[in-house]
Amino acid sequence: SLRDALEKLKLNDASLHYEPEVSEALGFGFRCGFLGLLHMEIVQERLEREFDQDLITTAPSVVYEVLKADGEVIRVENPSKIPDAGGVNEIREPIVTVHLYMPQDYVGAVMTLANLKRGVQMNMAYHGKQVMLTYEMPLGEIVLDFFDKLKSVSRGYASMDYVFKEFRASDVVKVDILLNGEKV
């Protein structure tokens, strides 16, 4: 079973985190935590190759904070768990401080990418022929494909690191998808 395969992988990979999850659309499965997309791809490949598992994977997601109408703050890992609009005062998304390092030649392309990913530039520092850009960005924009796109626009010369800053109120809404009148 998938649970047994994950338990065996966890013995060799302490950074792998998983917990049972039930989805109306996909059924029973596991929500897994990884160190990044490469780590996710390696675990997926090992599950398929070594344990003969047929997997369906979804896009990475992040935890949001929800300020409910009654003043309670809850953390939500799955958008389906967000209360209906009348019960929500505010939805806060995780914001990270991102440091981007690159040669001067790629500053324009990297700034364009960061702006497309809802980044707000906080600082720019020159160190010889290298540049360090500091941005605040939503974590949800980072975990999906930011690193791959950063490498692409810089021809592999840019690097990055990031640290969590805060949960910040954001203009996001919950969208329910109905299949035969049922939420999925």
Image (cartoon, rainbow, N blue to C red):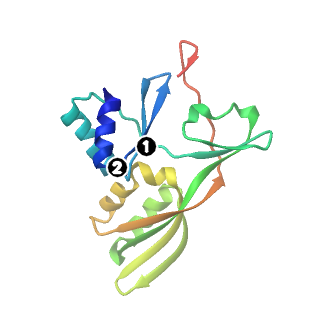
Q: Are marks 1 and 2 in contact (CB under 8 Å)?
A: yes
Horizontal placement of 16 versus 98: left or right? left
Horizontal placement of 124 versus 38: left or right? right
Q: Amino acid at mark 1?
A: Pro
N-term mark: 1 or 2: 2
Q: Which mark is residue 161?
A: none
Residue at figure coordinates x 36%, y 87% from the top left: 128
Is residue 114 or residue 65 the one in the foreground?
65
Is residue 34 or residue 38 the one in the foreground?
34
Residue that extends furthest to the front in the rendered view of this protein = 11
Is residue 55 or residue 146 the one in the foreground?
55
Q: Quick check: 74 above or below 134?
A: above
Circle 1: is it few (<14), some (14-19), or many (20+) Cα within 10 Å? some
Secondary structure under the numbered disc 2 in the rendered image: helix
Secondary structure under the numbered disc 1 in the rendered image: loop
Circle 2: is it few (<14), some (14-19), or many (20+) Cα within 10 Å? some
Residue at figure coordinates x 26%, y 29% from the top left: 53
Q: Quick check: 63 above or below 160?
A: above
Q: Amino acid at mark 2?
A: Leu
Residue that extends furthest to the left in the rendered view of this protein = 49
- Quarter of the rendering occupied by the N terminus: top left
Q: Is residue 69 visible?
A: yes
Residue at figure coordinates x 29%, y 69% from the top left: 157
Query: What residue would you read off at disc 2?
Result: 37
Residue at figure coordinates x 21%, y 29% from the top left: 52
Place of residue 89 in the rendered image (x, y in percent of width and height, measured from the top left): 75, 42
* Number of numbered tags placed on the structure image: 2
Query: What residue would you read off at disc 1?
Result: 60
Q: Is residue 56 visible?
A: no
Place of residue 172 in the rendered image (x, y in percent of width and height, measured from the top left): 62, 43
